[in-house]
Image (cartoon, grey):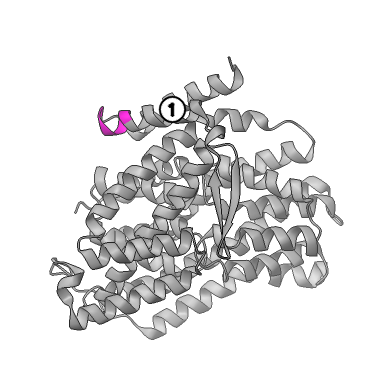
Amino acid sequence: MNSPTLQQAIVVWVRVALLSFGGPAAQIAVMHRIVVEEKRWVDEPRFMHALNFCMLLPGPEAQQLATYLGWLMHGVRGGLIAGILFILPGFFAILALSFLYAYLLDVSLVAALFFGLKAAVLALVLLAVKKIASKALMTRPLAATGAVSFISIAIFDVPFPLIISAAAFAGYLWAKQRPAWLGDSLLPADSWRPQPVSMTGTARVLLIGFVIWLLPLILMLPTLGGDHVLVTEALFFSKVAVVTFGGAYSVLAYIAQQAVDVYQWLLPDEMLDGLGMAESTPGPLIQVVQFVGFMAAFRDAAPFSPPVAAVLGSLVTTWAAFVPCFVFVFAGAPHIERLRHNMAIAGALRGITAAVVGVIASLALWFASHVLFAEHRLIEFAGVGLSLPMPASIDLASLSLFAGALLALLKLNWGIGRVLIITVAVGAGLDLFPG
């Protein structure tokens, strides 16, 4: 495992951030390919160990994974740099698109530019799922755990915490009674032992972190009052930040319902437009909260001008949604690293790893379905609702770009950047000049 300098790491985290399209499965795939396979800065077990922890946390797991890996290599400073850089490209992209949207300008060009990008990212996702699965599902019981996890979340919509808890319990029992079911090398091969973790230090991190998190409220309440839209946004999205278990997909419906029906910040179609922006720009899908905060403050700006209020709304919602991510990682990561050397806990985490593979596979399937097919139909059977793509709606252009990207990555060994540039150019041409 190589140890990069901070400057080398910054360059890579900028690259990861600029390529972080397509939701959590795609973002995890990009990080895995660059940090694990290409740079070899983190080995496979360490990467999956970090991912397991981040999947357990509320908030966007990919952004937290970047923060964890940055912390692992360069401490708190490295974690802050990696996590902030992961958010920044999407923040500025959505801020610019929100201004265009608010002033009734056409933003459909964005979708055209990123038409080919999604097909290339899908190829990256599928390759990453295949590679991670081949290393994580090393025994039949682990493979069965991954399959059950996939079926549970993709078909039966079983709550994510329940899936992970069951997998952890199974892994814990197997470590004690059937360790062979978990494969070889349950504990790390390296001789490094983590430093003792101070509970006082953890409490200090939590205290400082939550004071920083609440800073906008502390500053705004005395001057704006509890009923101001910026204060309401800070409170609402702070609550969202601690209930988003299972990633953005699990909480988007709740955000949409509250923003549209309860607070009446947006119309239903506008919420869908915001989701489209978040899907078409780099960064976590949960970044859609920024668009919601922007539009709500833009329309209820006093005592500020609409543009100033809109920028403040973007900042407040982004702050409320993402600051806890850093707090959870910096407080928990030292303890999680120590658990790598506990046999029973290592078994539980290996069970979680298998379940996480199933969850990532379900996200990849959802992503593939929406990239390659234009229409879907809800099928209900035995009380279970399943959204299936309609074969007649297949997008042949996307399918062709996906196949080309897969060939370039798998057979021609092209780099990610080269593949993405070509697919964006070809996809934009096909979408802007059809026929």
Whether residue 193 sits left or right of residue 34 in the image: it is left
Question: In the rendered view, would you say 8 is above or below 372?
Answer: below
Q: Is residue 68 visible?
A: no
Range covered by the magenta-colored residues = 407-412
Q: Quadrant of residue 317?
A: bottom right
Magenta stretch contains residue 387? no
Where does residue 50 sit, x and y in percent of width and height? 34, 64
Q: Main secondary structure of the magenta part?
A: helix
* In the foreground, 330 or 388: 388
Q: Quadrant of residue 238?
A: bottom right
Question: In the rendered view, would you say 339 is above or below 394?
Answer: below
**Residue located beneath label 1 in the image:** 401
Quarter containing the C terminus: top right
Whether residue 41 sits left or right of residue 212 in the image: it is left
The residue sitting at 20% across, 60% down in the picture is 138
Quarter containing the N terminus: bottom left
| Residue sitting at the far bottom | 200
Where does residue 425 sit, x and y in percent of width and height? 49, 22
Crowding around mark 1 (Cα neighbors within 10 Å: few <14, some 14 to 19, many 20+) is many
Mark 1 secondary-structure assignment = helix
Q: Amino acid at mark 1?
A: Leu
Q: Is residue 403 visible?
A: yes
Q: Quadrant of residue 321?
A: bottom right
Question: In the rendered view, would you say 27 is above or below 259?
Answer: above
